[in-house]
Amino acid sequence: MWKRSGRPTAQQLQGDYALLQLDRRAGALELLVDRYGQSSLFVRRVGEQVWVCTEPFPLLTSGPRLSVAVEALPDIFALRVLTGRHSVWDGIRQVVPGQWLTLTQAGLSESPPVPCHRFEPDKSPWLMADAAAQVTDGTRRRIERLRDEGVAEVAVPLSGGVDSTIIAAIARTVFPSCRGYTMRMEGFSNPELPRAEEVARRLGIPLTIVPVSAADVRSRFPDVIARLQEPPRHFNNMPMLCMLDAISNSASVVLAGDGVEQFGAGSLGFSLSLAARKRSLDRVPFALRPIVATLLRATGGARGARLAGILRKTLPELVLQIELLEATAAAREILGAQVGSGLPTSDTLSRTFFPELPVDEMFTTWVTTSLGRAINRRNTRLGQQVGVRFVYPLLDPSLLAVAATLPLEMRFDIGGSLSKPVLRRVCANLVGGDVAEWSKFGFATPEVEWIQEPLREVYEQAFSADSKVAELFDVEQLRTLPIAANKQTVWTLMTLDSVLRQAAAVA
């Protein structure tokens, strides 16, 4: 295939892969990873040698010791997701999904980044019932292929949300022994648990509730850092690893409902609403906008302040408000200018926002290449830790083709404020209309309690005089920050310090 059509062929590949193409005659090594970032690829040049690995830690063992990449700090503190070229270390860079990286004797060159989604809503108009039927059939075919490949047992993490419910409802018809999994955390009421139990009851599948104790959180934390090798975005990685460990006792494949952004993720509707207001306010002449923004803040109350913010910010900045890790003014003052203004670097923005795309597709691409990538990579690496493989049926090419041609009203019901109308119809057909209308809670965790109790030693290390982050920030001042109000900043510092400690031990 490569001989016939070269790069275009590779860009069409599906799945979680990292690809290296060596052209001996041209003296060039070309690298590519899948567009959704389920896999990763890191590069380090040491003299005349080029080292390439799917993880960064092994690259630290060759050549001189590397320092922290200061250029990556804005991304780490704004997102805890490195979606651009930067890694945590200066001298190790990563291949960006949807973009070729070519190494020659002359150095590195890059192709323009390619959006991971298509959006052609006028190409194939749909009726809701037909689109729902296509999604159902496509999901079933993807799961049936697993059975035909020889997979015998599968597990579905159940949140009680639409996506995991659809996967479980179809999987049980293909794999009679399909099991659902959720968790119960010590001292914390998991809001998803009652809904997961109800979905399992309706589907008639067994549900395993994995207990997660404070001791599990403490003992699993180093394993999470060792596998992710970058600051984890979410606090829930330790419970996730506990659940995957339990799954590994009975199944080799996890069927996950992640990857539904192309059908209209919840943040899509909020972004579209922001975009509509932004377009209206942008009718104000550019020179007058500072004056109008000042008047809105002074006279419009809370609503005026929001409109003033919309007027003064760019569209990408507004979209980023949905996913940014907000730092308090006190924390930002101590952290200093090297963590930036609270927004990611231009390197990340240029690879996740594509102005030529329609507005809603731009947002879809952002969600996929930022949080989607963090979740996919997290899942892949933690699954490797215990020997299970993640499969995302809703990322099947046939379903992406359907999603690309859905009209906007089937991607988000703006009037009803419901995301993913097509998937909700599928869920209603399979399980019931009441389940289809449930809103998703998200994977909540008791973050502050964990920092203060089972992870207290990690906190103490990160904010001690000999911590790794003390070489970058004034940890004595940072330690004075109240944990509850600054839990995102505290978690970033704790995990960054742990990553750097483990890296130093490896190197």
Image: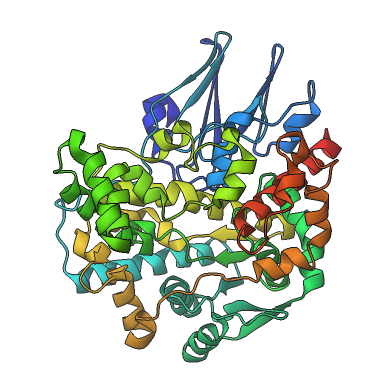
Foreground residue among 302 and 274: 302
Examine the image and state in which quarter residue 451 appears.
bottom right
Q: How many numbered tags mark residues here?
A: 0
Q: Residue furthest front?
A: 298
Can residue 191 be seen? yes
Tell me: 385 left or right of 236. Answer: right
Q: Residue at x 55, y 38 (%)?
A: 74
Q: Residue at x 63, y 41 (%)?
A: 335
Vertical comparison of 148 with 477: above or below: below
Q: Residue at x 63, y 59 (%)?
A: 487
Q: Position of residue 123 (x, y in %)?
A: 15, 51
Quadrant of the frame with the N terminus: top left
Q: Residue at x 28, y 71 (%)?
A: 417
Tell me: 267 left or right of 185. Answer: left
Can residue 381 be seen? no
Vertical comparison of 395 with 113: above or below: below
Q: Position of residue 179 (x, y in %)?
A: 59, 79
Foreground residue among 469 and 388: 469
The colour style of the image is rainbow
Quadrant of the frame with the C terminus: top right
Foreground residue among 78 and 400: 78
Q: Position of residue 49 (x, y in %)?
A: 70, 16
Q: Position of residue 251 (x, y in %)?
A: 65, 70
Tell me: 440 left or right of 77. Answer: left
Foreground residue among 64 and 139: 64
